[in-house]
Amino acid sequence: MMRRSFAGFVMLALLIFAEPSAVGALEYTFATIDVPGAVYTSAFGIDDTDRVVGGFSSSSFSGFTQHGFLTDGTAFTQIDYPGSPGTVLVSININSQIVGARCCVPNERGFLYDGTTFTDIIVPNTLNNNAGGLNTSGQIVGAANYASTTRGYLTVDRGATFTQFDFPGSNDTDPGGINDVGQIAGYFIDGAGVPHGFLKNGATFTQIDAPGSNSTFAFGINIFGHIVGRFTTTAGGPFHGFVTDGVTFTQLDVPGALTTEAFGINSAGKIVGRYTDRGGHVHGFLAELTSNTPGKVTGGGYIQPDGTMTPATLLIRSGVNAGVGDKATFGFVVQFSAGDANPAGNLQYNDHAANVTIKALSFTMLNIGDGVCGPNTHVTIQGSATVTGPSGASTQRFDVEVDDCGAPSSTAPDTFKITTSGQTDYMAAGPVIAGNITIRKQ
């Protein structure tokens, strides 16, 4: 049951629109992506320069008339696998490498395209296989169909060798994305035939289910561990998109649409996908967080990853792994007022055992929304920082997610998560110990 196979590419859900369920409330604006002259457009992947890839049809919804496309937001380039009646592009990295699937000569197969050459990604002894996602290093994940099972795979050498994996207890595992620290997002089908999302972090699998859902599909993941996908709340019900940081779910519905599905997300949090309008036409979309939320957030204390939260402290590119139980201290004050160009404030973080410090230089995002502890209890902070690690100092993008659940003694603790992307790829998360988070929305 491969996600962005040609069968899945042309599947329409022309059903009655449902009211949003009670999940998180980050606010997004949506822009439609339509290839000129197309009757059907789906956007599947977006890189950190905002280039988008996907598939379109100019004549029908048939899987045998699909073309791949690449757009920089201004011009569209059609890309077709030579000799194939159908091409879909599903993921792109900053090195202009693209993975996708071609149909059906004689079977559906994945491929890697570097701007000049198509390289087949063919898992041995399979009926079909796709290529679902790739990261900056060129690591590729996808799904491979056998006679009675679908297995996930990872290849780090352009399809020369494969490492296969399965969500425990499932015979249908379909990875959709991989980020630069090697985390993999996808979905699996359980023994009762119910789809669930998953996060694979090393050898550890975590099940992902949108609140109130009866099916959840996870597809894309960015460097900060934010995952996008789709879910339903009733049998045969319409798709809703979602984005989650692992704690809070935000439902994504294009205004007025019958269905919404989210497939890709970049490090800036921009999301691409597709929606079905009330006339039954399918369009791609680009979603971005709305302008900053007027308010103020303060916090201080330390986290001490105890192995029960995901992720614990990680350093990937530098080759250093901080020990579980090591203390990491933080302090910050960030605020935004209506009329300001950007948020202002300060933020410092120190992972003492790993010898990593993060000091904010500027802020681009302060977004206050609903969280696990109620309305206006979750904040996303983004900006640039000086990150000093074992490999030296550099200016990098950072993302902080916090939850304000009450006093330090509250049953549900405040939480703090920080991620950086660049020379030192770093993640840490945990409950706040001997400290507090306070959120005030104006």
Image (spheres, helix red, strand yellow):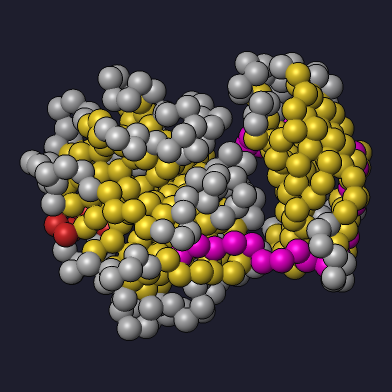
Evaluate whether residue 250 shows in this view. no
Total count of labels: 0
* Residue 176 inside the magenta-drawn segment: no
Residue closest to the eye, 341 or 126: 341
**At 56% from the left edge and 55% from the top edge, which residue is drawn?**
270
**At 28% from the left edge and 69% from the top edge, which residue is drawn?**
38
Q: Is residue 102 left or right of residue 349?
A: left
**At 29% from the left edge and 19% from the top edge, which residue is drawn?**
161
Q: Is residue 218 left or right of residue 438?
A: left
* Residue sticking out furthest to the left: 106
Residue closest to the eye, 103 or 417: 103
* Residue sticking out furthest to the front: 75
Give residue 325's quadrant in the image.
top right
Q: Is residue 72 left or right of residue 122?
A: right
Percent position of residue 52, x then y: 44, 52
Give residue 130's quadrant in the image.
top left
In this rendering, the answer to whether 230 lies above or below 326 is: below
Percent position of residue 174, x then y: 34, 42
Percent position of residue 300, x then y: 90, 42
The segment highlighted magenta reads 285-311
Give residue 60's quadrant in the image.
bottom left
Q: Is residue 67 left or right of residue 402?
A: left
Residue closest to the eye, 269 or 70: 70
Q: Quadrant of the C terminus?
A: bottom right
* Residue 308 inside the magenta-drawn segment: yes
Evaluate whether residue 127 shows in this view. yes
Percent position of residue 15, x then y: 34, 78
In this rendering, the answer to whether 20 lies above or below 117 is: below
In this rendering, the answer to whether 441 lies above or below 111 is: below
